[in-house]
């Protein structure tokens, strides 16, 4: 059972091709506005009345909001399977992102599902103990349309042997 | 082009982490000290969002009209951002493409360097914004 889990495995034990569905989130108008007020000034993200007259014909989620929710879903997913392993022991920081594109607007009430697939492992050793796992991450709306896609390099602790 | 500065308070860092990145080193000082970062620090996604906002505000002030962030070809997190540290960005405009995922817009590449205290490089973001198509 524990072989399926992300956080309690060493770098060496995480296979390329492994696929996970982190979970789904339904975006509400209120949370979209709250995020955008702090991080994006455009009325498309902050003002439902004005947004109705603009290019998307209604409020949409700020791009970083859709992405930040991926992080939340990943952390929640890992926590469920953490099995008492101390945080940071075998699963470390993200170091870089590649090829991130936002493909479709996310609107209030849309349910977004986030997926993760390991697509590469680097032989590079960071600070004597971390390996680098590259994953492809995608997010789909309730109609199956892809709304976000990116790759990210995340550190994973190497086993002691 | 240089942006304004912004810093993140402990409360702002923890609030963001609770909502989007609830890992101990983003929510608890002791856990931050014990982590690879060496202190309570902001989520990399919060830094990305703040840096993009600073860059986008600067583009507006300079007469460009960034409509939406549509792509990040590459982003590197170089250093953690700790409580109350100032962040600023330096922006270089790259090439322009005639189309965009946003209707009626062009794509403008924008290279964003994110600096912390003492001009230390915190992150690099190679972004594409949808901008109003020129007439």
Image (spheres, coloured by chain):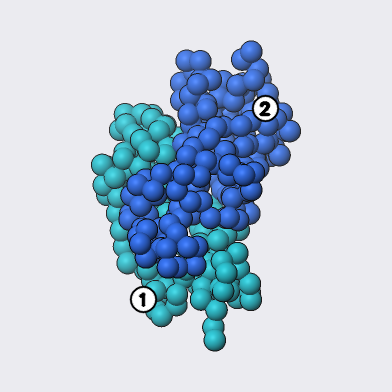
Chain colours: A blue, B cyan
The spot of residue B59 in percent (x, y) is 42, 73
Q: Residue at x 58, y 38 (%)?
A: A114
User: Mark on residue A14?
Assistant: 2
Q: Residue at x 55, y 61 (%)?
A: B70
Res A157 quadrant in image: top right
Res B105 quadrant in image: bottom right
Callout 2 crowding tier (Cα within 10 Å): few <14, some 14–19, many ≥20: some
> Where A104 sits versus A24, above or below?
below
Can see residue A75?
A: yes
Which of the two residues, B135 or B8, is positioned nearer the viewer here? B135
Q: Residue at x 64, y 13 (%)?
A: A1
Q: Residue at x 64, y 40 (%)?
A: A135
Locate the C terminus of chain B and report the quarter of the image it occupies: bottom right
Same chain assignment for discs 1 and 2: no
Looking at the rendered structure, the secondary structure element under dot 1 is helix
Q: Which residue is mark 1?
A: B61
The spot of residue B45 in percent (x, y) is 45, 47
Which of the two residues, B9 or A128, is positioned nearer the viewer here? B9
| Subunit under mark 2 | A
The spot of residue B9 in percent (x, y) is 26, 47
């Amino acid at each position: 059972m524990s072989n399926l889990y992300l956080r309690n495995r060493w770098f060496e034990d995480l296979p390329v091709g492994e696929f996970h569905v982190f979970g789904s989130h339904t975006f509400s108008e209120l949370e979209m506005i709250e995020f955008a007020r702090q991080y994006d000034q455009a009325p498309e993200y902050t003002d439902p009345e004005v947004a109705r007259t603009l290019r998307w014909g209604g409020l949409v989620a700020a791009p970083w909001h859709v992405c930040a929710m991926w992080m939340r879903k990943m952390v929640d997913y890992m926590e469920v399977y953490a099995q008492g392993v101390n945080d940071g022991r075998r699963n470390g920081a993200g170091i870089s992102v590649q090829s991130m594109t936002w493909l479709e607007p996310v609107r209030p009430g849309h349910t977004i599902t986030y997926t993760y697939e390991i697509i590469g492992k680097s032989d590079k050793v960071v600070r004597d103990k971390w390996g680098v796992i590259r994953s492809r991450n995608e997010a789909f709306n309730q109609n199956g349309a892809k709304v976000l896609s990116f790759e990210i390099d995340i550190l994973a602790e190497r086993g002691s042997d | 082009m240089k942006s304004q500065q912004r810093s993140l308070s402990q409360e702002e860092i923890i609030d963001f982490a609770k909502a989007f990145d609830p890992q101990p080193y983003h929510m608890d000082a002791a856990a931050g000290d014990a982590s690879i970062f060496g202190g309570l620090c902001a989520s990399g996604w919060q830094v990305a969002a703040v840096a993009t906002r600073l860059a986008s505000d600067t583009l507006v002030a300079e007469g460009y009209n960034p409509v939406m962030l549509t792509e990040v070809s590459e982003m590197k997190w170089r250093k953690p951002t700790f409580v109350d540290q100032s962040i600023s960005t330096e922006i270089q405009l790259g090439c322009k493409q005639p189309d965009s995922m946003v209707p009626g817009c062009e794509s403008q590449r924008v290279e964003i360097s994110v600096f912390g205290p003492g001009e230390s490089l915190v992150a690099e973001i190679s972004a594409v914004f949808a901008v109003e198509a020129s007439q």
